[in-house]
Amino acid sequence: MTTAEPTASIAQGATTRDLTADPARFAREILDPIRAVVGERGVITDRAAMQPMMVAWRDNWNGRVPLVVMPATTEQMAAVVAICARTNTPIVPQGGNTGLTGAGQPHGDDSEIVVSTRRMNRIREIDLANDTITVDAGVVLQVIQETARANGRLFPLSLGAEGSCQIGGNLSTNAGGVQALRYGTARALVAGLEVVLPDGQIWDGLRGLRKDNAGYDLKQIFIGAEGTLGIITAATLKLLPLPKASATAFLATPSPATAVSWLRRAKSSLGDSITTVELMERRCLDVAIKHNASIRDPLPTRHDWYLLVEVADQSTHDALEAHLLSALEAGLDGGELVDGTVASSAEQAAALWRIREGTPEGQRLEGASYKHDVSVPISKVAQFIEEANGALETRFPGLRSFAFGHLGDGNIHYNPLQAEGGDGSVWQSYLPEVNQIVHDIVAKLGGSITAEHGIGRLRIGEVERYKSDVEMMMMRKLKNCFDPYNIMNPGKLLTRARLSPGTAG
Amino acid sequence: MTTAEPTASIAQGATTRDLTADPARFAREILDPIRAVVGERGVITDRAAMQPMMVAWRDNWNGRVPLVVMPATTEQMAAVVAICARTNTPIVPQGGNTGLTGAGQPHGDDSEIVVSTRRMNRIREIDLANDTITVDAGVVLQVIQETARANGRLFPLSLGAEGSCQIGGNLSTNAGGVQALRYGTARALVAGLEVVLPDGQIWDGLRGLRKDNAGYDLKQIFIGAEGTLGIITAATLKLLPLPKASATAFLATPSPATAVSWLRRAKSSLGDSITTVELMERRCLDVAIKHNASIRDPLPTRHDWYLLVEVADQSTHDALEAHLLSALEAGLDGGELVDGTVASSAEQAAALWRIREGTPEGQRLEGASYKHDVSVPISKVAQFIEEANGALETRFPGLRSFAFGHLGDGNIHYNPLQAEGGDGSVWQSYLPEVNQIVHDIVAKLGGSITAEHGIGRLRIGEVERYKSDVEMMMMRKLKNCFDPYNIMNPGKLLTRARLSPGTAG
């Protein structure tokens, strides 16, 4: 499902100015001073060359800016931000440009510049006795994973875009992924941060400490802030022991309720060794198989719901597999599971993972879908799916419910698909109503309308419907406190127009 | 070592006012309206009756206030804070009064009132399928641990004061304790918070979610804020699987360097099953044994350094013990360990823990000691101890170095003791110089001068020596943003006098 561009008046308020309206002034006050800092290699002014950074890979955000800046160091980044602060020039920080909410896309009105971390890609230090690695913000997630592994350590953050997303973006969205059940979201993996503040000062909070109660834990403010409070330029990340054994199972379960019930039992017997519990509706398999010839149904008969489960620990493969099998047998005895298979090789495990990974692509090829990245208490997952399915099927006959995601975190990607053979553009027009039906149920159950993708531009109007006035006021206070002129990614996470009077840039 | 009262001018600035200077006005504007909210049972005005809440159990803070308020509900708390906001009356939030930095003690000048959470002690909800428990701020930590255990779950926060500290205070100090190595500090165990803000509004952030990226993660701001940004009134906490097996070992190691080296090896082979790795100098055993007849040396010969290690997981005791023994043997083969014993019963394990627990009390009975709660990267622990010992022994001959604590987190309680038989009061006078020697080394090694106890009043002057101007500015901005009139625990964590001009209450 593509998403309409928010109107400029909501996204940016009435204060937007076209930086290119006076080209000589733009060159004199912004472009030339920035070029003097970062050099010719650090700027892009050619519209065609910057085009890949103006669009998102999934949604139809279309940005337009007169300048993309690529600082090579933190000091350059600070100098660039200081120029922007002095000239009141709004900045859109961008990492690997793999986000799903438009947080990294500029608006389409030449009112901002993009500042990219792509040239800041050094691994600064690895401290094995401290189990930490310090990296520039522009290092690609997979590079960190591989560096950790080459040193006998695990960096557990793992998600679809890991081959191109950058750690600065991962931290700015507090990315989740498929192992958050065990290792937490990106936030849990951060020991320290370095941030360029909206006034161009550098905050060096790169401490490699597990415990530090000397005052407010300032790094927490920037994690998940979507670049609206400053630009993360480096991070000290926690490394973990590399598991010695892992096992992967694909299980059939009658319903989300039985899946939750088995999860509860499995946590008790498998404990921290559970790294992944992904729930999938049968339709996930159907579209994954239909659109990818390398994907097969691993079980002999059809079932309504499935779980992809992975466990890992420091024991041996045989001991771990025995442990897993015992949890599966208990589930079969208890009626929570009805069938299942345990991968007997790395190839088989990869084949099971392909089902999960093929699900989003299968959906995309199937037609217009409504993407929701919601979380509810795990105890409410079954109720959420049942109520959302019921409400949508009543209102939109033929709509195909499509739930999958990280059951272990209560994070469901609930992406109903248009009716088979329907007119995609008609179905797209239902988006606001579908969103509201789904998100109203999420809110009623104490959930979040964006569990791991963030607000960006995609949810910016909706979030105010579900948050209390007190909470919105607190968020605006925090924004005003650190970015009083609203030059940091304006119109993302918070609407630009609704900052306190007199503070919008 | 007792600690001198900071002077009023540093702690509170020049704006302090004696609330009792005009008794009629105090009664009319503050006491009577508050009594009308909380009832007679909710106020203490008798100086003798409130005395236990004016003093700290370890240090010699001596507070004096005209009123202690004990709201029974969040709504009462909000109404009380609103009265204080209206009348610009500073509030000292207090939980179990077990803190170690004076953060919960009022100043001694009748300029504040104490607001205690002791009557807010309901367990609001336990959701086993979601593995969360929601509790009032005044619930005692041990009650939460026991409630979790009775429901087959673990609440892993564990520390010496657990029988009397309250969860609101634990969260406000981001308590650490003996299992933080595996489960993180208190911060990691929070899913949601309810907070009464400095203007008396209630923020209901009691969400039982593992993932929620709908905007800034506001709860993080209040965790570890020592009550300076608002009063935590309730929390939704994460519960974990109750381990099925545990094993405890007491090991001798030649030096901190070998201890760190073995820890690195053990993490690789034991992984997440390691819950505790406590380092102790021989002197810890000596004073613990000397002052507690129930404590015995568990090993046949004397060694310089020891480790108390605990592992726990979902396997069987035999499997876990075999796993632990194999890690110990590898340490013996590698020269990182020189002797050790594994407890063969719960009683033996308890006896090993008594050594660790008897260490602070043994020190106290031995004379004046200088208490430091520092952290450094784990890779720097050995260097820290060596340099601190060397610098102190050079400057203060006879001073007995005394290091123990949470090696797995890099958190060392470094408490040198006065020379044997010396004059305690003379040794006390060395405190500022000792602190500076130790903390300068910590800072040089990238550490924190308060790893888990917080700043409170104890470290308020020192923290500015070690933090950058940028970081102090960020902390003050955050304080000003949420508590512009500085009525929330003024003179704790941040000096009152150094807030922005015009904002001090």
Image (cartoon, coloured by chain):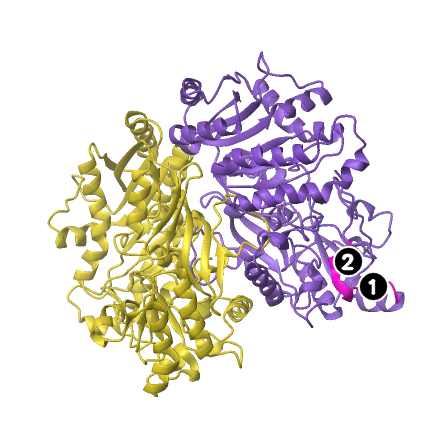
Chain colours: A yellow, B purple
Horizontal and vertical percent position of residue B34: 77, 62
- Compute the Cα span from label 1 to label 2: 9 Å
Confirm whether the magenta stretch covers residue B17: yes
**Disc 1 target residue:** B19
Q: Nearer the viewer, residue B59 or A118?
A: A118
Residue B352 versus residue A504 in the image, above or below: above
Where's the C terminus of chain B, which quadrant? Answer: bottom right
Confirm whether the magenta stretch covers residue A22: no
Horizontal and vertical percent position of residue B180: 52, 39
Q: Secondary structure at mark 1?
A: loop
Sequence-wise first label, 1 or 2: 1
The residue sitting at 53% across, 18% down in the picture is B343
Please indicate, yes or no, whether residue B451 appears anywhere in the rendered image: no
Horizontal and vertical percent position of residue A69: 32, 69
The disc placed on residue B347 is none
Q: Secondary structure at mark 2?
A: strand
Q: Which residues are magenta?
A: B7-22
**Disc 2 target residue:** B113
**Label 1: chain?**
B
Number of labelled discs?
2
Dot 1 and dot 2 residues touching (CB under 8 Å): yes
